[in-house]
Structures are given as structure tokens and as C-alpha cells.
Image (tube, helix red, strand yellow):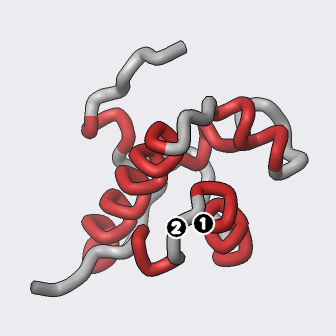
Amino acid sequence: MSKRQSAETRKSRKSRTAQFQESYDILLERLVAAREKAGLTQHEVSATMGRSPNFITKCESGDRSIDVMELFELAMIYEKPVNHFFATKG
């Protein structure tokens, strides 16, 4: 299932403080890109984490918030430093 979602679909659907919305959307985009670069499916990542098959689907779409410890685990799975997923000021 390599159907690509538009950036608009990936935006978080939960209401968040406007001040952080853009940063959270960037985090979601970078999580998707890291997973795809690692050559993993959403179901494979969910299984690796011992979660339900749709866990990563909900996280990447913004239907579910990502806990800080889950972010650490995803960073390890994708072999990326945690700060890779955050927007930097520049």
C-alpha cells in the first residue's frame, strides 16, 4: 500500500495551540518520510512496537497524539536522532 497522502491529509486533526500546530505538522511529515526511507510499512512499525495494526496510521494522520516515549522508540526504529523530527529555526 504505497498510496501517498497529501500534506493536507497528514495535518493533525486534533485542535492544538496554534503556536505549535506548524511544528507538529512538520513532525508528522518527518515521521512519515523517515518511515518511508527506512522501507517500512505502517503495519510493520506498529508490529515492531507491539501496537495495533493501525497505531502508526493514526499517529501519522494526527488522529492520535504521539507520546514522547513513543517518539523516542520511533527514532530508534528509524535510526534517526530525536531532534531530526523537530523544526529548527533558521
Q: Name the residue under label 2.
A: 80
In the picture, measured across the screen, residue 78 lies left or right of residue 36, that is: right
Q: Please state the horizontal and vertical placement of residue 74, each as a whole percent of the image.
A: 65, 60
Please tell me whether mark 1 sits on a helix, a strand or a loop.
Answer: helix
Above or below: residue 21 compared with residue 14: below
> Which residue appears at 42% of the width and 16% of the height?
3
Q: Please state the horizontal and vertical placement of residue 61, each as a whole percent of the image.
A: 48, 41
- Residue type (three-letter) at the residue carrying disc 2: Lys
- Image quadrant holding the C terminus, namely bottom left
Q: Which residue occupies the extreme right position in the image?
A: 50
Q: Please state the horizontal and vertical placement of residue 69, each as a whole percent of the image.
A: 72, 75
- Within 10 Å of disc 2 (Cα), the crowding (few <14, some 14-19, many 20+) is some
Q: Mark 1 points at which residue?
A: 75
Q: Please state the horizontal and vertical placement of residue 45, each as a whole percent of the image.
A: 71, 42
Q: Which mark is first along the chain, 2 or 1?
A: 1
Near-viewer residue (27 or 77): 77
- Image quadrant holding the N terminus, namely top right
In the picture, measured across the screen, residue 20 lies left or right of residue 12, that is: left
- Residue type (three-letter) at the residue carrying disc 1: Ala
Dividing the picture into quarters, in which one does residue 52 lie? Answer: top right
